[in-house]
Amino acid sequence: MRQRSLLVTALLVAVLAGSLPLAAHQSMTLKKNLHVAAGETQENVMTFGGHIVVEGTVKESVVAFGGTIEISGEVGEAVIGIGSAITIRPTAVIRGDLVSIGGKLVKEAGCSVQGDTVDFDFGEIGARLFKGNVAKGIFSFSLIPLLLILKLIGLFVWFLLAFFVAALFPRQIAYASHQIRAHFWPIFWTGLLGIVIFAALFLLAALLCLILVGIPILFSLFLAGIIIKIFGRVVLLFLIGESLLRSLGSRKPSTLGAVTIGLLAVGLAGFIPVLGFLFTFVLNILGWGVVLRTKFGTKENWFHHKNHDKK
């Protein structure tokens, strides 16, 4: 039974991975431990909880969730670590951005980072937040300051997620945003139907948990829901931010700039009672719709093309 559950999990994860925007990168190397030796060249490298050592050349991005990154060679675009220990050696050349979120970053003297360096150490932030009278102030007043702080923390987490997604998939986000403008109602109804079907599948998987086989299915559905929600929400943040910036006279807003402005606008709208909830609910529907209809911003309407090919 356990082997069967693991097999189901592997199959579902493989299906989900095939739908991710990472499929747009034809040469993404995904392993637990990766070593790009001197003289070797890779396009993109990614790991979940493993170790990446780059002594040669990575043409595009290095991404790690947990684990470690050690760069002594050259990276053509970004180095991104989420909860990772990142070490940049003196001989390293990073032609894009260096981003460390919730991990440790060490830049040794002599290294070259031509883009921006973003370093968020949650340990230090948390220590500063609850040092002194900040924590006392939270509990000495009503729940309003606490709810406000939780709301701001939520916005900060969304900013980190949006920054990460927008930096990796700017073309897919822009394309999916354009599809919402061109096909608003079809995308809306696709999203509503998708949420209903997903809820039914989630409930069925919860019932199957009674015979164990439903546990990996439930986990896979949960993971798929998170991925769809994050990517769809970032697309909508870009759409809202771009619209606002264009109305203010900006001709060609950057992806990260538009996403940031959109996040601020959506965050402010979320503070409005009732209307804020309805607004967020509509965003969720549109987010699901645009992800399902465009297959993460890679096709105009993959349902239509699939049916057309069968004919």
Image (cartoon, helix red, strand yellow):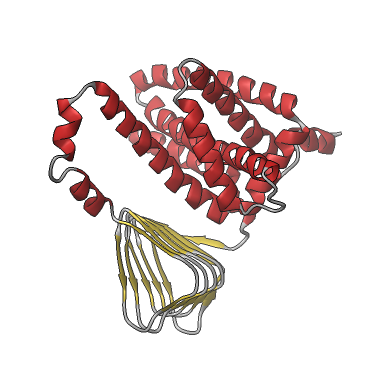
x and y, in percent, of residue 11 in the image: 50, 40
Image quadrant where residue 65 sits: bottom left
Whether residue 1 can be seen here: no
Instruction: Tell me: 236 left or right of 299.
Output: left
Of all residues, the one furthest to the right in this rendering is 311
Answer above or below: position of 128 versus 57: above
Of all residues, the one furthest to the front in this rendering is 248
Question: Which of the two residues, 151 or 285, is positioned nearer the viewer here?
Answer: 151
Answer above or below: position of 159 versus 202: below
x and y, in percent, of residue 118 in the image: 40, 61
Q: Quadrant of the C terminus?
A: top right
x and y, in percent, of residue 138 in the image: 20, 31
Whether residue 170 can be seen here: yes
Q: Quadrant of the N terminus?
A: top left
Q: Residue at the spot x=57%, y=51% of the render?
A: 257
Image quadrant where residue 290 sits: top right
The total of numbered circles placed on residues is 0
Q: Residue at the spot x=12%, y=44% of the render?
A: 132
Instruction: Tell me: 82 left or right of 275.
Output: left
x and y, in percent, of residue 192 in the image: 62, 20
Question: Which of the two residues, 295 or 40, is positioned nearer the viewer here?
Answer: 295
Instruction: Tell me: 201 left or right of 91.
Output: right
Q: Residue at the spot x=57%, y=18% of the render?
A: 196
